Structure formats: structure tokens, C-alpha cells
Amino acid sequence: MQEKILQGKISTTLIGYAVPVILNMAATQFYSIADAMMVGTGLGSGALAAVSNGATVLQFFLFISGGMELGGNLLVASIKKSRIGEELTKTVYNMIVLDLAIGVVLMILGQVFLGNILNLINTPEMIFSQAMLYTRIYLAGLPFQMGYDLMKQILMGYGDSRRPMCLVLLTTCFNIGMDAVLIYVIPLGVAGAAIASAAAQVIGMILCFGILYRTILKQRFRWEYLGLGPMREMMRLSLPTIFQQIMGPFSSMVRQSLLGRIGVSAIAGFSAANSLSVFLLMPMAGCSQALVVFTAQNLSAGQEKRTREAARVSRWLTAGITTALILLCVCFHEPLLSLYTSDREALSYGALMLTHEPFFYYFYALRNINESRLRGYRKMKEYLISSISTTCLVVLFTWLLVGQIGFSGFYLATGAGNILGLAVSGVLASSLKKEKISGERSGG
């Protein structure tokens, strides 16, 4: 696959790379769904709402992690042709050390300010202690999760999407099994769900580093490898993505705050529908990730024409995926939501979301393709403008519409924000000029 990205048939290569990425993302999200299902059915809607509020807080930290890992993915993809041997090893070690250090700092900050953040999103008093317990335990494993996620993205940026997929499948199965034991057999409540997640991340990081050591690194770590140059390079690509990722939980906090005014059933219903939506959007996210790596590697090899053809293929792929998802949500929303909760009021809220929001997926998918091209070209400023403007529009419309028309305002705001966001990303992507970029220039 690593050489097919530069030489193989574009449609086959994109699909071949994207499928393991999609399965990787789907497995990760499947755990979230299974976790929510076990918490909701085994511990009740109150526990499900507590985990939902805790997850909203965790998004702040996990999306910073996401920004780091996507920056690392892009960096490795764009320097693959220009750095080999010890130079590549030094760069990767610097990325890992920087990521782990940031993970430790975030863990400490999260533990200190957790109560304040839960109050900020209007966490109901009846679930506050459970949300606090779940989030504290999960945060303890944050550095391991960040390390694990970055290492997976390093492998994928290099062109290997299959081994990360196998690792995710393994850790997901372990996580779900631990969930079942610690919720049903050894009843630890929401703490059991958090412990299972943290343990899986520790195991995943150890295994992933082993693969990296045998394939890309091939040398032991040395302190003299560390330097400001590679770290600055990673941060230059990661910071725009971090800012973009942080806006996601900001949007979620606004929504959770508004949901808290409606009630616990609205929180549970929204949580169930949102969890399913994130899972259903994985194929589009996988296609976008494949397009970023494909674009970066081909640009570094001076093959700009292949990147434009890849974008065209990606549009057709995501259009077909979106149509299938709409049919799935409209026809099977009730049995899907029933996997999470049997509360009729929560189900009615969830059904309202799941039968309306997917119609806006077309705009979401096309915007993602435009932004993937911008990232592949390393146009990080333009990418940041496109992404943040969309999030700000969604937040603004959510604040305005929910206050006026109630729960329906959530999916209408998402749709309106993505329609306008597509227009912004289209203008920015149209500025990309045909250019032949050398491997050395792409590496810098």
C-alpha cells in the first residue's frame, strides 16, 4: 500500500487505504456505542447521562490529542520521501516525546479544573458525582491514550493503515470485555467503564510502540535525538488542527448546556443519537483521512495531477456512502436507538435527531473533502479558517434556534452551519494552484 499511493490506480488505492482506516475508526466508535449501551442498560439513564456529560468534558482533552495525532500523520506523510534512516527516527522520537509531555500536562489540568468544567455545562446535581468519578479515572489514562493515538497515526501517515486497524480491533475487544466484567460481574458502576478504557489505552500504546520500533524506528531512543527543530515542525502542523479540534468540544459544551435546561431525557436521547451519528460518519472521515495522506505523499513526489483526480473520486465515494446512511437512519432509527435506552421520552428525542440530521451529511462530506485537500497541501491557515468558521456558525445557529424552537434547533443548526461552511471551504480550496512540490519543500 505504501508504494501504491504513489503509483497505483487512484480509486483502488484510495479505497484500499481508506477501508482499514474506516474500520479503525468504526472499531473505536463501536466501543463508545457498546460502552454507552452497557452503561445505559446496566446502570440506567442517569448513569448514561453522567457518562455523556463526562465525555463532553473529555472532548476538550481528546481533541487536543486528535490535533497532535493528525499533525503527526501529515508530517510523516509529507517527509516520507525526503527523510530516511536516522533522520526519520529522530523526527518520530521527537513527536512521541512531545506528545507524551503534553498528555501529562493535560491530565494534571483536567484533574484540577474538572469540577468547574462540569458546573460550566450545567451538569444536573443528581448525576454530578458519577460524572466526576468517571472523568477523573478516564483522565488518569490520558497520556497513554495520546501516545497510542499518535503512534497509530504515524504508521498511517507512512502508508500502513492495516496494522493500526488490527491493533484497534484488539484493544476494542479487550475494552468491551473489561466493560462487561466491571459493570455486570464486578459492579463498579461508571468507574468500571472508565477503568476498562484506561487499561485498554495502556496496552494499545505498548503494542503500537513495538510495531513502530520494528518498522520505522529500528533504533533505541537517545536523548541527543531530541531537538527543537522537529518539535516546532510538528507543532506548526498540529496547532491549527488542535484549534479546530478544540472548537468541537466547545460546540458540544454549548449543546450540553442547552440540553441541561430541557432535562435528563433530552440529554440521554441526544447522547444516543449523537453516538450513532458519529459512528455513521466514520466512512466519510476515513475517506477524508485517506485523501490527506494520498495528497501529501503525491505532492511530495511532484504528482499534483493525481491529487486532483483523488479528490474527484472521493466526492463520488462519499456521495454514495451518504445516501446509504440516510436510508439506514430513516428506516432503522428505532431499533438502533433502543440499543441505548428503553426510556420512551429519551427515545423520542433521539429519533427526532436521527431522522433529520443525516440529510445534511452531503454538505458535511463535501466540506471534509475540501478541507482534506487543504491539509494535504499543508495550507493549514486556510484549513483552520474553513473548519473554525463552520463550527462557529453551528454554535451560533444552535444558540439562536434552540432558544426559539426547542430541540429541533440542534439538527437544523448543524445543517445550516455545514451548508455555509461548505461554501467557505469551496472558496478556499479553489485557490489551490497546480504546483510541483519537491520532497524537500514538502518536508519543510
Image (tube, rainbow, N blue to C red):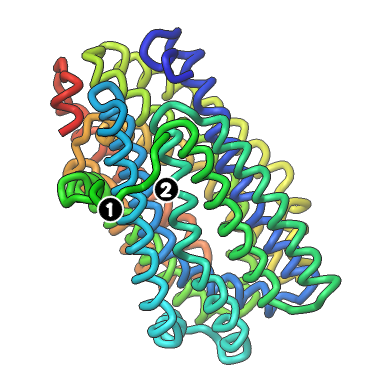
Q: Is label 1 in contact with label 2 (beta carbons under 8 Å)? A: no
Give SS at disc 1: helix
Q: Residues within 10 Å of mark 2 (few under 14, many from 20)?
A: many
Instruction: From the image, tell me which residue sits under label 1.
Output: 223
Which residue lies at the image location 49% right of the left edge and 56% below the top edge?
Answer: 411
| Residue at far right of view | 185
- The numbered disc on residue 178 is none
Q: Nearer the viewer, mark 1 or mark 2?
A: 1
Question: Between disc 1 and disc 2, whose residue precedes?
Answer: 2
Quarter in which the C terminus is drawn: top left
Q: Nearer the viewer, residue 102 or 85?
A: 85
Q: Which residue is mark 2?
A: 150
Distance (Cα) linking label 1 and label 2: 20 Å
Q: Taking 16 as reference, is 101 left or right?
A: left
**Residue 172 vertical position relative to residue 308 in the rendered view, above or below:** below
Q: Give the residue type that dot 1 points to.
A: Trp
Q: Is residue 278 rendered to the left or right of residue 111?
A: right
Residue 363 visible in the snapshot: no
Examine the image and state in which quarter residue 380 appears: top left
Q: Is residue 412 left or right of residue 326?
A: left
Between 242 and 173, the one lying in front of the other is: 173
Horizontal and vertical percent position of residue 254? 40, 71
Residue 125 visible in the picture: yes
167 above or below 137?
A: above
Q: Secondary structure under badge 2?
A: helix
- Residue at image x 49%, y 34%? 214
Residue nearest the viewer, comparing 192 with 54:
192
Q: Is 156 drawn above or below residue 121 in the view shown?
A: above
Give percent across and percent down for residue 400: 35, 68
Q: Residue at x 62, y 31 (%)?
A: 324
Q: Position of residue 414 (x, y in %)?
A: 42, 53
